[in-house]
Image (cartoon, coloured by chain):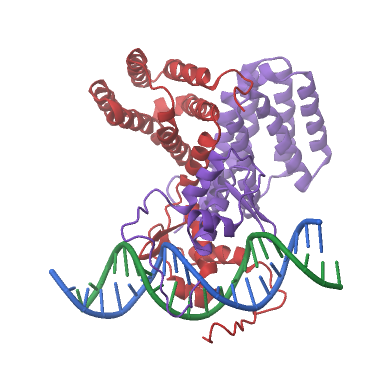
Chain colours: A red, B purple, C blue, D green
Amino acid sequence: MQGSQAGRTPPRAPGREQLGRTVAEQIKRHILEHRLRPGDPLPTENELCATLGASRSSVREAMKTLAALDIVQIRHGNGTFVGSLSLAPLVASLTFRGRYSPGDDARVLAELVELRQLFEQGMAARIVAALDDDRLAELDAQVAAMTTATGAELVAADREFHRLLIEPTGNALVGQMTGAFWDVYAVVAPDLATASDAETRQALDAHRSLVAAARTRDPGAFVTAVEAHYAPLRQRLTAAAGPVGRTNR
Amino acid sequence: MQGSQAGRTPPRAPGREQLGRTVAEQIKRHILEHRLRPGDPLPTENELCATLGASRSSVREAMKTLAALDIVQIRHGNGTFVGSLSLAPLVASLTFRGRYSPGDDARVLAELVELRQLFEQGMAARIVAALDDDRLAELDAQVAAMTTATGAELVAADREFHRLLIEPTGNALVGQMTGAFWDVYAVVAPDLATASDAETRQALDAHRSLVAAARTRDPGAFVTAVEAHYAPLRQRLTAAAGPVGRTNR
DNA sequence: TAATATTTGTACGTATGTATG
DNA sequence: TCATACATACGTACAAATATT
């Protein structure tokens, strides 16, 4: 409005409290109150400045905070939209933690793999109960794909296989976390030794055993197969992480 | 440096790289390369502006992004420091998701509780093996505290009890996730019906059974006790979430 | 294809609240 | 109490990306 050099900007109220924190909160409330769904457009920055009574800098910083949490999504030259509420922030946090200090990467991955095993073993009864013929056929297809694929395609097939296992349990959070762990692995794993050919063949057999156990609706055999599936990987990761005491720093 | 109205700001280079070298990435790299630990101070915004060749706005927005992920911590009038790398972003994401639409809150909580049960049952063997006499005594103390406490103190004792269960397993990630789930519950749960007196007594008995199973080093009994512990809560939450199909909106 | 409007991204200057010594 | 260092906030101008005409 006024000239810039005069710098007359009455701060709205002498005792105002941390408006910056509130802006992000207000934007969140806007999303909730308007029942906006992922992908829906938000008001432009200038509109938000007007309705919230804040400067564009403040609005932008709040937007950056919300974007980091995947609550909003910012598209340059286009606008801001409601985010997909994924576990991307968890991935960002864990990947940074993995790179945080040498040796920690393997330890983080080991804990992640342990969690995946926990998921699939704990869900074993529900998994074998929920897998119908169609899903079993899909699992067969992924196993077949793994026999021929290599590199990135092998990883993709492996990931899809485990996604198909978890999905029918109905617990979306477990599925999303499993996906997040794969993302973390994709970022951190290149720093570690890759699987040997023998380990790859072993894993392939383990996948076949998983499908077989599911087909016979045998939760006990399924749990055993999960154990056999993750044992080599866990051993490799715990070996890379070193003994219990920190190895470096 | 120059006057502001002229607006002469040559953008550094016509074809500047821009990709992969965002300000936030560079700050993260700074932390990694200098081996900074949580709590260590970061350069001031002005120093970062100079070293990174960016304006305060850009640095501030990058800082906001990293602060949302708990990678850095901003203290007003003090400085910026390395964050504690907690799962706070996961909590923020899940709490927002819980408030996202009516009915979802209970569903998110139900999935969270299911995960906690998965953790403790999957870790049962390691838990009962790792709990020494000192830790068992601490668990007894928490159970005793729960018999007299009410409200927030009851919740605190309950939380500490389960933290003590998970901690000795050595999987820090599971412990942090359990803590994060408690945080989410504290935010979202007030919108739901609280436990009845009968359910509270039932939960107390369940905790005693957990300690008893751990004391006799009986993983099977421990798993059964975990099942009994979570059954009432899960039933209440699934009832609040309604049938599988969405109940509202 | 090209011009234009809209919207986000970046930069700079300035004033102010806050914590520390 | 004063001084300093720092983050917070506001306003403006311009660059860059996108969509529309």
Q: Is residue A116 above or below residue A172?
A: above
* Residue C13 figure quarter: bottom right
Q: Position of residue A194 (x, y in %)?
A: 38, 22
| Foreground pick, B45 / A225 | B45
Q: Position of residue A244 (x, y in %)?
A: 62, 20
Residue, x 54% and y 39% (percent of image)? B32
Residue, x 61% and y 22% (percent of image)? B124
Report whether residue B102 is seen: no
Locate residue A86 relative to residue C17 in the image: left or right: left
Q: Position of residue A89 (x, y in %)?
A: 49, 46
| Foreground pick, A153 / A211 | A153
| Foreground pick, D19 / B67 | B67
Residue, x 34% and y 17% (percent of image)? A200
| Foreground pick, B24 / A23 | B24
- Quadrant containing the C terminus of chain B is bottom left
Residue, x 42% and y 49% (percent of image)? B21
Report whether residue B178 is seen: yes
Residue positioned most to the bottom: A2
Locate residue B32 relative to residue A14 in the image: left or right: left
Q: Is residue B198 above or below residue A137?
A: below
